[in-house]
Image (cartoon, coloured by chain):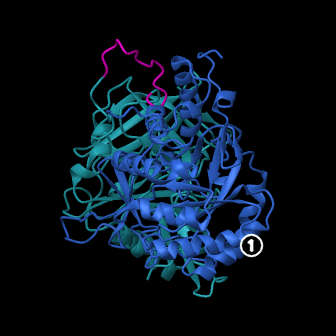
Amino acid sequence: MNCATPNATDPRLATDLCGVRLRTPILTASGTCGYGPEYADVLDYRRLGGFTTKSVTLRERPGNNPERIVEVRAGMLNAIGLANVGMDRFMVEKLPFIRTMPTAVFVNVAGHSMDDYVRVAETLDGADGLAGIELNVSCPNVSDGLMFGTDARLLRELVAAVRGVTRRGKLIVKLTPNVTDICDLARAAIDGGADALSMINTYVGMAIDTQNWKPMLANVTGGLSGPAIRPLALYLIHRVYRGVAREAKIPIIGMGGIQSTRDAIEFFLVGASAVAVGTALFIDPTLPVKIADGLCEYLESKNLQSVSELIGQVKLPA
Amino acid sequence: MTLVKTQKLCAAEARVTRVEHPCRAHVRLHFALPSFPKSDPGQFVQISAHPNRDDAPRELCWPTDEMPRPMMADWSAEDAFLRRPFSLADRRELADGRSELTVISRAIGRGTRWLDSLQIGDALNISGPLGRGFRLPAQSDTCILVGGGVGIPPLIYLARQLCEARFSDVVVILGAMSRDLLPVVLTAEPACNGAARECVLLADGVSYPSIVATNDGTLGIRGLVTDALREHVSHAGILADHTHVFACGPERMLHAVAEQTRALGLHCQLCIERMMGCGMGTCLSCVTAVNDASRPAGWRWGLACGEGPVFDRDRLKWD
């Protein structure tokens, strides 16, 4: 392979993620790429590892009042509030396009109760053309969004219940960093039957307008994303990989402020099997393809045959 | 380096061709791209408001162990992070085949300060055209363009398009806090009695009878654009059903224009401003309340970047 002609479909980038074959280990993160049509003009889905949709809930949610986002140093806060059309309209309005996407698609599922999650997961599991679902137990922007994601016992029950109705598709659980020990939650998700973990969702944060002393977000708090959280995400993935996931042989999809190939490589080295680009898509929707191209060049420069040779290979002091 | 180009959307590097300072606070930036898809006044572009780092994601040259490496973990901490949305303030096709776009910016933060620092020849990354723009009425109809401060730019582009489409019955009403905050070039002193006269060069070769209003009375009439609009309509003897008002400016101004035009039975399109993340319909942040009879509540959130930023007056829910 010649480095001068990078190719995001280079065989060295091919990745097996809990049994799903991905063309590259670079995915898009939920909530930053819509349901597919939004970036269809600009992002070549044939060169993408995988696509994770915006959250779907059982019933339609209008979302929070504006302002819903605010830029902060090296990132942004968002409080969209899981705005989505609800499961019934998703199946009619969104799924037909998703089925045509030439990449692995995971549908992000959120809910207020165990029953909500199970009903949406069951319906999606019956649909063709999906690689699986990503369970959102970590939305900080709705009143009970973090309930399941911060209580290990509840999380294990929820994952087990959704596992019971998720027979065809893979089950990914997206963890929140807003907990005391993320390893407890990772273990609960794996015990409940998760096929993979994705981490991390946003950190709860605030910004205040010093002119009028009001919070800049109508929701008061929001989720911090972007490069500001990258070192924090890296650390949590490092911990979960070494503490739980490696031994359980459960892959991690790493995310949190990834903007470059170098960033992605850091995540592989601490134990991520794949990575997702989120907020940076708002700036450049083609970034996953560029990162994959750069990764190809990196493998070439290090004389590596596969991304798997990087996973968890950080050299720690003896 | 070109990122993307499709029929509808272009994301590419542009080069600054001209920098003008029409008033104390604003910079009028013209930049050229090899080509740009068809665009309408009211549509916007997203600008990466920091030095072009198109190669940063790739790091084409991986350092070897022997090479010194920067100790910096992050290149972007001091840069504007998200792109910044700007209404197109003009568009021309250059003789060399390139498309020249214009935006008007006022330096208020990290991104706009960087734009303010640009010189001829500098590069900036543009994606667009985005959103839905103004729809033109019949050529024989009356058009009244109402722009307040930061909302003036899309109306300049609209004036260009009306001029090219040979609309003759056009009046432009522009307002600002003060004389030195009005981002247009004056060719004559505007009337202080509210009469419309050709006194403003909106864009190269584009001029229509104009009325200027300033809050402090330093230029044109003292007052708001809505005062000028009311005055003009009452004197001009217009045919309500054949009169179209196109407005862009602060929320309160748009609200007042909506009320006035509704009371008078005029057609009205409003271009709104919102905080934006992506400009492409994925971040769902630029919402505005739109009337929708099909919903139980009678309204829903609509995206300014997709359904707008130009809305028919009666689509917007104000309370």
Looking at the image, which residue sits at the far top? B66
- Above or below residue A87? Residue A250 is above
In the image, is residue A252 part of the stretch drawn in magenta? no
Left or right: A12 as drawn, with respect to A252: right
Residue B159 visible in the displayed image? yes
Tag 1: Cα neighbours inside 10 Å, few (<14), some, or many (≥20)?
A: some
What color is chain B drawn in? cyan
x 62%, y 64%: residue: A193
- Above or below residue A168? Residue A265 is above
Residue B273 visible in the displayed image? no
Query: Which chain's residue wears label 1?
Result: A
Which of the chains is blue? A
Quarter of the image with the C terminus of chain B is: bottom left
Q: What residue type is labelled 1?
A: Thr
- Above or below residue B241? Residue A177 is above
Residue B118: x %, y % from top left = 32, 31
In the image, is residue B62 part of the stretch drawn in magenta? yes
Q: Which of B254 and B296 is in front in this view?
A: B296
Residue for badge 1: A123
Quadrant position of residue A6: top right
Range of residues picked out in magenta: B56-69
Quadrant position of residue B134: bottom right
x 36%, y 73%: residue: A218
Residue B19: x %, y % from top left = 34, 32
